[in-house]
Protein backbone atom coordinates (compact mmCIF):
# COMPACT_ATOMS: atom_id res chain seq x y z
CA UNK A 1 0.00 0.00 0.00
CA UNK A 2 2.81 2.40 0.84
CA UNK A 3 4.35 1.88 -2.60
CA UNK A 4 1.05 2.77 -4.29
CA UNK A 5 0.64 5.87 -2.12
CA UNK A 6 4.18 6.95 -3.02
CA UNK A 7 3.35 6.58 -6.72
CA UNK A 8 0.20 8.68 -6.31
CA UNK A 9 2.09 11.31 -4.35
CA UNK A 10 4.61 11.57 -7.19
CA UNK A 11 1.75 12.09 -9.67
CA UNK A 12 0.11 14.79 -7.53
CA UNK A 13 1.31 18.19 -8.75
CA UNK A 14 -0.48 20.34 -6.19
CA UNK A 15 -3.63 20.69 -8.29
CA UNK A 16 -4.49 17.18 -9.42
CA UNK A 17 -3.08 13.86 -10.54
CA UNK A 18 -0.87 13.96 -13.62
CA UNK A 19 -1.34 10.45 -14.99
CA UNK A 20 -1.19 8.93 -18.47
CA UNK A 21 -4.63 10.27 -19.41
CA UNK A 22 -3.61 13.78 -18.40
CA UNK A 23 -0.31 13.59 -20.31
CA UNK A 24 -1.18 11.51 -23.38
CA UNK A 25 -4.93 10.95 -23.34
CA UNK A 26 -7.51 11.58 -25.99
CA UNK A 27 -8.51 15.11 -26.92
CA UNK A 28 -11.21 15.10 -24.25
CA UNK A 29 -8.76 13.97 -21.52
CA UNK A 30 -5.40 15.52 -22.45
CA UNK A 31 -4.42 18.26 -20.00
CA UNK A 32 -7.59 17.87 -17.93
CA UNK A 33 -7.53 16.79 -14.31
CA UNK A 34 -10.07 14.11 -13.41
CA UNK A 35 -11.93 15.21 -10.29
CA UNK A 36 -12.77 11.68 -9.15
CA UNK A 37 -9.09 10.69 -9.17
CA UNK A 38 -8.22 13.60 -6.89
CA UNK A 39 -11.15 12.70 -4.62
CA UNK A 40 -9.96 9.09 -4.37
CA UNK A 41 -6.41 10.23 -3.68
CA UNK A 42 -7.59 12.51 -0.85
CA UNK A 43 -9.72 9.67 0.53
CA UNK A 44 -6.69 7.34 0.49
CA UNK A 45 -4.60 10.00 2.25
CA UNK A 46 -7.28 10.32 4.91
CA UNK A 47 -7.52 6.52 5.32
CA UNK A 48 -3.75 6.24 5.81
CA UNK A 49 -3.61 9.14 8.25
CA UNK A 50 -1.48 11.36 6.00
CA UNK A 51 -4.23 13.78 5.02
CA UNK A 52 -3.75 17.47 5.76
CA UNK A 53 -6.77 19.73 5.93
CA UNK A 54 -6.88 22.29 3.16
CA UNK A 55 -5.96 19.89 0.37
CA UNK A 56 -9.63 19.59 -0.56
CA UNK A 57 -9.59 23.19 -1.88
CA UNK A 58 -8.32 21.90 -5.23
CA UNK A 59 -11.13 19.35 -5.33
CA UNK A 60 -13.74 22.08 -4.79
CA UNK A 61 -12.12 24.26 -7.44
CA UNK A 62 -12.06 21.45 -9.99
CA UNK A 63 -15.67 20.62 -9.18
CA UNK A 64 -16.75 24.18 -9.83
CA UNK A 65 -17.73 24.90 -6.22
Image (cartoon, grey):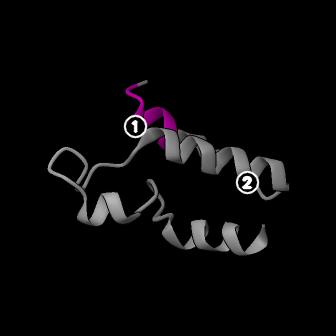
What kind of secondary structure does the magenta stretch mostly adopt? helix
Q: Which mark is residue 62?
A: 1
| Residue carrying label 2 | 45
Q: Which residues are magenta?
A: 58-64
In this picture, residue 20 sits left or right of residue 16 = left
Q: Which mark is residue 32?
A: none
Label pair 2/1, CB-CB below 8 angstroms? no
Query: Does dot 2 land on a helix, a strand or a loop?
Result: helix
Q: Which residue occupies the extreme right position in the image? A: 49
Quarter of the image where the N terminus is located = bottom right
Coordinates of residue 37 in the picture (x, y in percent): 51, 46
Q: Which residue occupies the extreme front position in the image? A: 26
Q: Is residue 53 above or below residue 3?
A: above
- Residue at 79 percent of width and 59 percent of height: 50
Residue 2 visible in this rendered orientation of the protein: yes
In this picture, residue 56 sits left or right of residue 49 = left
| Residue 10 covered by magenta stretch | no
Please identify the quarter of the rendering in which residue 30 is found: bottom left
- For marks 2 and 1, the one nearer the N-term is 2
Label 1: how many Cα within 10 Å (few below 14, some 14–19, many 20+)? some
In this picture, residue 16 sits left or right of residue 48 = left
Query: Does dot 1 land on a helix, a strand or a loop?
Result: helix
Quarter of the image where the C terminus is located = top left
Coordinates of residue 43 in the picture (x, y in percent): 70, 44
Q: Is residue 40 above or below residue 2?
A: above
From the viewer's side, name the closer residue of 60 and 30: 30
Q: Which residue occupies the extreme top position in the image? A: 65
Amino acid sequence: MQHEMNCLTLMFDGRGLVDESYKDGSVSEHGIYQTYKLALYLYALQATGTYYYGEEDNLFRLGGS
